[in-house]
Amino acid sequence: MSEQDSATHGAHQDDALKREVRSELEANRATRAEEWLEPEPPAEDEPEATWAPEGRPGGTPPGEDWDTLELRSDLARHLDRTAYPATRSHLLEVLASHQAEQRLLDLVSSLPEGTTYANLSELLRALGIPIEERPG
């Protein structure tokens, strides 16, 4: 069954709903008939709501950049706890089996052979990637 077949309404209704939502978003004013349905504006001591730059939610911790966070996250996603302890060759096997991006394979390939890494923190230190420091 296709996604279109499982929908609760057809393409014509989908288009009508898209037009309705688009006009509400572009109106730049209240569009609800009932005032209580409108979101409350921020209080005097609260900042205005804004979109995250470049579509990224939140911000990066001080002293870190988005690329480092993304790299650390990608490694953690592909190398779960069952991958450790591991050598370079085992890490490469796990990354390949999880269909990791070539940049991760290249990064891990630069590690020396014969060294065993007990966990992600040891691996990150060996790769020269800063480890996230959480306030305690």
Image (cartoon, rainbow, N blue to C red):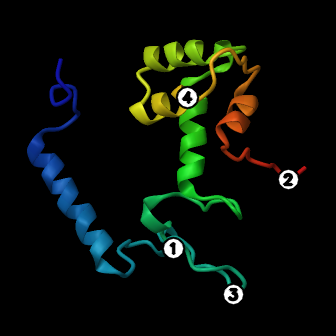
Number of other residues with Cα within 10 Å of mark 4, as a class: few under 14, some 14 to 19, many 20 or more: many
In the rendered structure, the answer to whether residue 116 lies left or right of residue 24 reads right
Q: Mark 3 highlights which residue?
A: 44
Assess whether mark 1 and mark 3 are in contact (beta carbons under 8 angstroms). no
SS class of the residue under badge 4? helix
Residue type at mark 1: give it.
Answer: Thr
* Residue at 41% across, 21% down: 99
Residues 11 and 81: in front is 81
Q: Mark 1 highlights which residue?
A: 50
Residue type at mark 3: give it.
Answer: Glu
- What whole-number distance in Å separates the C-alpha atoms at marks 4 and 2? 29 Å
Number of other residues with Cα within 10 Å of mark 1, as a class: few under 14, some 14 to 19, many 20 or more: few
Residue 72 image position (x, y, % from top left):
60, 40
- What whole-number distance in Å separates the C-alpha atoms at marks 3 and 4? 50 Å
Q: Mark 2 highlights which residue?
A: 135
Q: Nearer the viewer, mark 4 or mark 2?
A: 4
In the rendered structure, the answer to whether residue 8 lies left or right of residue 135 reads left
Q: Earlier in the sequence, mark 3 or mark 4?
A: 3
Assess whether mark 2 and mark 1 are in contact (beta carbons under 8 angstroms). no
Q: Earlier in the sequence, mark 3 or mark 1?
A: 3
Identity of the residue furthest to the right in this view: 136
Number of other residues with Cα within 10 Å of mark 2, as a class: few under 14, some 14 to 19, many 20 or more: few
In the rendered structure, the answer to whether residue 125 lies left or right of residue 9 reads right
Quadrant of image for the N terminus: top left
- What whole-number distance in Å separates the C-alpha atoms at marks 3 and 1? 16 Å
Q: Earlier in the sequence, mark 4 or mark 2?
A: 4
Residue type at mark 2: give it.
Answer: Pro
Q: Earlier in the sequence, mark 1 or mark 2?
A: 1
- What whole-number distance in Å separates the C-alpha atoms at marks 1 and 2? 26 Å
